[in-house]
Image: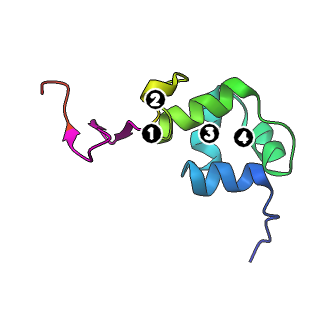
Amino acid sequence: MKYHEMTKNYIFREFECGLTVEETAELCFKSVRAIKEWNKGKVIPKECKRLMRFSSGRQLSAYECWSEFRMLSDKLELPTGQLVTPQE
């Protein structure tokens, strides 16, 4: 079994965003090697962190008024818990 040090970046990518190394590399237009360096503690660029949050549905916008909205698959979850599609 391979040991992984649980850095803040590793926890953010793996558990908070639910992204694999390969998915993160593709999403951020980086190499797998670069993502592995982030896992070891190298700083993740702000724009990549934002992409990772957007991709995982953790953040829709930097604006506070959107803070309680999130994406779940192809639906928008409202602060009330209701899920809506683009047609609704």
Mark 2 and 4 residues: CB-CB less than 8 Å, in contact?
no
Mark 3 and 1 residues: CB-CB less than 8 Å, in contact?
no
Between the C-alphas of marks 3 and 4, the distance is: 8 Å
Residue at image mark 2:
60
Mark 2 and 1 residues: CB-CB less than 8 Å, in contact?
yes
Amino acid beneath label 2: Leu
Q: Residue at x 67, y 29 (%)?
A: 48
Q: Residues within 10 Å of mark 2 (few under 14, many from 20)?
A: many
Q: Residue 29: horizontal and vertical position, in percent?
A: 65, 25
- Is 84 positioned to the left or the right of 45 in the image? left
Mark 4 and 1 residues: CB-CB less than 8 Å, in contact?
no
Q: Which residues are magenta?
A: 68-83
Residue at image mark 4:
32
Q: Quarter holding the N terminus?
A: bottom right
Amino acid beneath label 4: Val
Q: Residue 78: horizontal and vertical position, in percent?
A: 29, 38
Q: Residue 88: horizontal and vertical position, in percent?
A: 12, 27
Q: Residue at x 50, y 32 (%)?
A: 54
Residue at image mark 3:
24
Q: Is residue 78 magenta?
A: yes
